[in-house]
Structure formats: structure tokens, C-alpha cells
């Protein structure tokens, strides 16, 4: 071969190699992917909560509003698995105590800032604890159990805390998972541009690291033309208030009066944790109306048909779920914390932890709950 031609060929090959390395490095920095390719929040959300056209919910921002309370947008910044948290690593090489939180929008921290969630309050700036926020808006115990089934063997938390909210137990018996996730890892050596193409075509957009768009959790509601609207109805129409709050107080009163629909939820959760050497904790979070009548005037603004004088959810008949959950936890030998007395005491001191119109907690409330759960875990010798 001609020496000059040989040198040109070598230079071309070196140039192409350098170009490939630069391209690969740039794409890996710009378009990160999680370690586990088939695990994402989208597999656990309730239908209708998020647009069905979505695939993986990784690396996105979503926001929640309650304009009768505040015009502030509370943005949830999602990690590569679609959960409101920092990035997760499968291996726990730091030696920190890994704590997994399971629950609904109260664990996710709806109506609070990114740093004002229950897991953040639990961590409380400790350098020896790693928290994982697997809270998912709009789901219940069926999803919690499936998440525990799928996540515990992969991430192997030291402690798993399942937070049961007031509306979780009076409707349907939790469905016990019959399948578990068989984790598939992204191929490290696969060129990122090939991953980018396959991920975009099969699992929805692969957003860049600097993606800053925000999607609303609440969508505008179309009302009848010409209908005179109250401020609450106007906010619902604009997508700045949760329309599910209309009629919610009657539904809440109904399911709180019936027996807790637990099924095999508690013993199954304990067994899932036991199988991987994880310590389980179950926490009950009451609704604001179970604690105080302070919020009733605001509830009446949302539901004008109710008579606040004849509806008192602080009475004993609406407190049975926590008692029944406590009995189930005792039978299964799992640590149980009922937050009702603690939060009731705060409300009696005029430290109102929930928003007036929206059902969720303020950031101060979530942080308080996280700190109380940590105190409880410490008292049980788990930290």
C-alpha cells in the first residue's frame, strides 16, 4: 500500500475515533439513562392522572397548584426513574442507611417544595442516611405493595416505610402482587445514540439533562358556556384547583366509617421486607378533618351543600382505620406509628399543617411528619 495513502487512512481513522468518542461523551452527559431500563414511575400511576400518551416519566418536571390557597406553582422535579427525588443508585456503596418511603401524594410532597417532603424531614440533613422518595400521586396500597415487591430486591433498603393516608383503607381491598420486576440493566457498551433512538421510539422522549419544561398535574375543565362560576369553580376550570375536591368530604366521611379494607396488605409487606433483610415500618397519616374542625369553613366553600355543623370527622366513629391498622401491624410484628395524636396536638396549638382548600400538607407539615417518623424509628433501634 502507498505509504502516503496509508498515513491518510490512519489519520482518517484516528479522526473518526476521536469524533465518535466526543460524540459519545457528549450524548452520555446530555442524555443520561437509569441503571435499570424497565423500571419507571409510569408503571404504577393511576390511569387518568397523567396523559396516557406518556411513556417513561423520567427527568421531567410536573407542577401542582391550588389558587384558592396560593398562586405559587409547586414543581416536582423527577429523577431518571420518574420519582420526585435525587438520582438513585442500585448499589449502596456509601455505607449510609438506605430508607425507602412508599406512599401517595403525601409522600411525594404535593403542595410543597422539592426540599420539603416527608423523606427530607426524615433525613434532616444527616450525612449517614440516604432516603428514597417513591411517593406516587393518586395511588393506594395496591401500588405501594407492587413498588415494594419490585424495588426492595433491587435497591435493598435497610428500612422500608409504608405511609398509609386516610383515604387508602375504606374503598378497595389491596391487590397482592402476583408478579415482580425482573430488572434489566442498560447495556453500558451500547452507543448512546443507539440508546437514544430506541428509547425515543419505544418509551417516549429521552429528555436531556437540562430539560426545564413543566407539565401540569391538573388539566383545565371545560364547563357549560354561559354558566356563572364561583371562584372555586373558576379555579377548577382554569386547572389551578383540584376538581376532585368537590364532593370529597362526603366520600371521606363514608369510607372512614367502614371497616378498614386491609386484606393481606400488612403481612405481605412484612414478608417482602423480610425476604431482603429490610426492616418494615407502617405509618398512618390522618386527613385534616380527622384532627380539627378548623378547615370546615373552607371545605364548605368548595362544597356549599354540606352542613358543617352536622359533619364532624374528629369523632371516634371516623378514627377506626388507625386502630384497625394498629391491630394488623401488631399481629404481623411490624412497627406501627399513628400520627393522629401528634398532628392533632399541633393543630390544637394553632399550628395548622394543612392547606385550607387543598387536602395536602404544607411543607412545614411534611417536614414535621418526617422528623416524627425518624424519632419513632430511632426509638425502635432501627437507626
Image: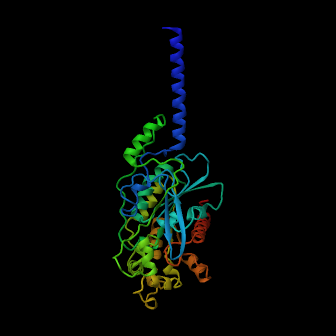
Q: Is residue 131 above or below residue 64?
A: above
How many numbered marks are there? 0
Pick out the residue farthest to the front.
226
Is 28 situated above or below 293? above
Residue at horizontal 47 percent and vertical 82 percent from the top: 299
Specify the farthest residue to the bottom.
Answer: 309
Expressed as whole percent of the image width and height from the top left, the position of residue 349 reads 62, 82
- Nearer to me, 99 or 251: 251
- Picture quadrant where residue 232 is located: bottom left
Q: Position of residue 333 (x, y in %)?
A: 49, 65
Name the image quarter holding residue 228.
Answer: bottom left
| 121 relative to 189, above or below | below
Residue nearer the viewer, 301 or 80: 301
Foreground of the two, 181 or 280? 181
Which x, y percent locates residue 263? 37, 67
Whether residue 380 is visible: no
Residue at 53%, 66% (x, y): give it.
73
The quarter of the picture where the C terminus appears is: bottom right
**Quarter holding residue 376:** bottom right
Question: In the drawing, does residue 25 fall left or right of residue 224?
Answer: right
Residue 311 visible in the displayed image: yes
Q: Position of residue 88 (x, y in %)?
A: 53, 50
Amino acid at each position: 500500500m502507498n505509504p502516503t495513502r496509508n498515513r491518510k487512512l490512519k489519520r482518517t481513522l484516528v479522526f473518526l475515533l476521536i469524533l465518535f468518542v466526543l460524540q459519545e461523551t457528549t450524548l452520555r452527559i446530555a442524555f443520561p439513562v437509569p441503571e435499570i431500563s424497565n423500571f419507571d414511575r409510569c408503571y404504577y400511576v393511576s390511569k387518568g392522572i397523567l396523559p396516557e400518551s406518556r411513556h417513561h416519566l423520567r427527568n421531567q418536571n410536573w407542577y401542582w397548584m391550588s389558587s384558592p390557597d396560593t398562586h405559587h406553582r409547586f414543581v416536582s422535579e423527577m429523577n431518571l426513574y420518574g420519582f420526585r427525588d435525587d438520582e438513585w443508585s442500585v448499589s449502596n456503596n456509601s455505607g449510609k442507611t438506605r430508607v425507602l418511603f412508599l406512599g401517595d401524594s403525601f409522600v411525594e410532597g404535593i403542595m410543597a417544595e422539592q426540599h420539603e417532603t416527608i423523606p427530607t424531614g426524615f433525613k434532616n440533613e444527616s450525612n449517614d442516611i440516604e432516603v428514597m422518595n417513591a411517593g406516587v400521586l393518586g395511588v393506594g396500597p395496591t401500588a405501594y405493595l407492587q413498588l415494594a415487591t419490585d424495588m426492595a430486591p433491587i435497591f435493598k433498603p435497610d428500612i422500608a416505610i409504608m405511609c398509609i393516608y386516610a383515604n387508602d383503607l375504606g374503598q378497595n381491598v389491596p391487590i397482592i402482587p402476583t408478579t415482580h420486576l425482573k430488572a434489566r440493566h442498560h447495556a453500558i457498551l451500547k452507543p448512546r445514540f443507539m440508546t437514544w433512538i430506541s428509547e425515543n421510539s419505544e418509551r417516549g422522549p429521552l429528555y436531556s439533562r437540562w430539560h426545564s419544561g413543566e407539565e401540569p398535574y391538573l388539566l383545565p375543565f371545560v364547563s357549560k358556556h354561559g354558566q356563572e362560576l364561583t371562584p372555586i369553580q373558576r379555579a377548577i376550570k382554569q386547572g389551578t384547583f383540584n376538581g376532585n375536591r368537590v364532593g370529597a368530604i362526603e366520600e371521606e366521611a363514608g369510607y372512614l366509617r367502614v371497616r378498614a379494607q386491609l386484606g393481606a396488605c400488612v403481612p405481605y409487606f412484612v414478608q417482602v421486607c423480610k425476604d431482603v433483610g429490610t426492616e418494615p415500618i407502617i405509618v398512618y397519616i390522618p386527613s385534616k378533618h380527622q384532627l380539627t374542625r378548623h378547615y370546615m369553613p373552607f371545605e364548605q366553600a368548595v362544597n356549599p351543600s354540606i352542613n358543617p355543623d352536622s359533619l364532624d370527622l374528629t369523632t371516634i366513629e371516623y378514627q377506626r382505620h388507625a386502630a384497625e391498622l394498629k391491630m394488623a401491624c401488631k399481629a404481623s410484628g411490624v412497627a406501627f406509628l399513628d400520627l393522629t395524636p401528634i398532628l392533632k396536638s399541633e393543630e390544637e396549638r394553632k399550628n395548622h399543617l394543612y392547606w385550607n382548600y387543598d387536602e395536602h400538607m404544607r411543607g412545614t407539615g411534611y417536614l414535621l411528619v418526617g422528623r416524627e417518623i425518624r424519632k419513632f424509628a430511632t426509638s425502635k433501634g432501627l437507626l
